[in-house]
Image (cartoon, grey):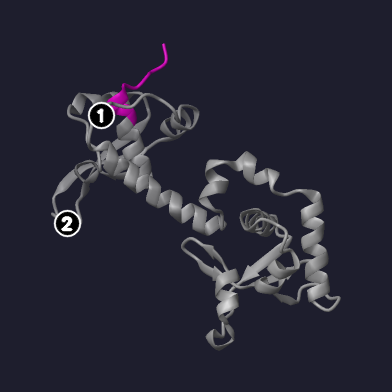
Amino acid sequence: MSFQPSPSQVLYLWSLLASGGEGFVNQQPYELNKASDRKALVNAGFISEEKRKSPTSGRLSNYNTLCDAGWAWMDAHLTATLPTRSTRGVQVMQQLIARMADFLAAKELSLAEFICPAEAQQTDQPDLIQRIRTACYQLGQGQWNTRVRLADLRQQLADVDRDTLDQTLLRLQQQRQLLLYPQDDPQQITAVDQAAAITIGGVGQRHLVYMQE
């Protein structure tokens, strides 16, 4: 019979995930009350345990690493039951949200695309994409890969809902069909540019569009 971790063991696995997949036991946002519960995870091959010198205390402490079996189980059981009375779960969630924020910034994705990917995908209507391409080509004086002010693009597509246009531009950037750039020279950023900018969490504002051919 395959090993099925208890809710508290599942939360401890999430704790390790939030810490990057490994860490000292006494520094985890959530610790198991019983060492036997941790040992059961070791015996199941979900985690490994060794003694390492703590950089803070200088003493040997238990150090856990999430093993391949643990990663695989978590990947297949993302909605596994968690303990309902643990207040330490909030700290685990905070660390996971911080990692999610880093991921969204690196991928230049909005929270809406993460929470509602199907709806975000629906914004990529072929006619809107073609209108964006045509507008960028016209604003670029008949050239591709030339900078276009996002403010000018918004004016050209004034009938398009702002959120819809933003989500489509971000999706096209993710698909490498265009690039969103900041205006490096602050002297050239007008109030209109500021109002038209797309703000990408953790990255900053984007004022310019470069459409690929």
| Residue most extreme to the front | 159
Quadrant location of residue 157?
Answer: bottom right
Q: Residue at x 46, y 63 (%)?
A: 202
Q: Residue furthest bottom?
A: 187
Separation of residues labelled 2 and 1 (CA atoms): 23 Å
Q: From the image, which quarter does the C terminus lie in?
A: bottom right
Whether residue 209 is visible, yes or no, is yes
Give the vertical position of 209 relative to 57 (above or below).
below
Check the image and report above or below for 62 versus 82: below
- Specify whether 178 is left or right of 47: right
Label 1 CA crowd tier, 10 Å (few <14, some 14–19, many 20+): many
What span is in magenta?
Answer: 1-10
Q: In which quadrant of the rendered view does residue 207 lie?
A: bottom right
Residue 84: x, y in percent? Answer: 27, 26
Whether residue 206 is in magenta: the answer is: no
Q: Secondary structure at mark 2?
A: loop
Earlier-in-chain disc, 2 versus 1: 1
Q: Residues within 10 Å of mark 2 (few under 14, many from 20)?
A: few
Amino acid carrying label 1: it is: Arg
Task: Note whether 206 is above or below 171 in the view shown.
Answer: below
CB-based contact (under 8 Å), mark 2 and mark 1 = no
Residue 174 in percent (x, y) is at 65, 56
Main SS of residues in magenta: loop
Which residue in the protein does label 1 denote?
38
Q: Residue placed farthest to the right in the image?
A: 142
Indicate the quadrant containing the N terminus: top left, top right, bottom left or bottom right.
top left
Nearest the camera: 158 or 107?
158
Q: Position of residue 69 (x, y in %)?
A: 44, 30
Which residue: 31% across, 24% down? 7
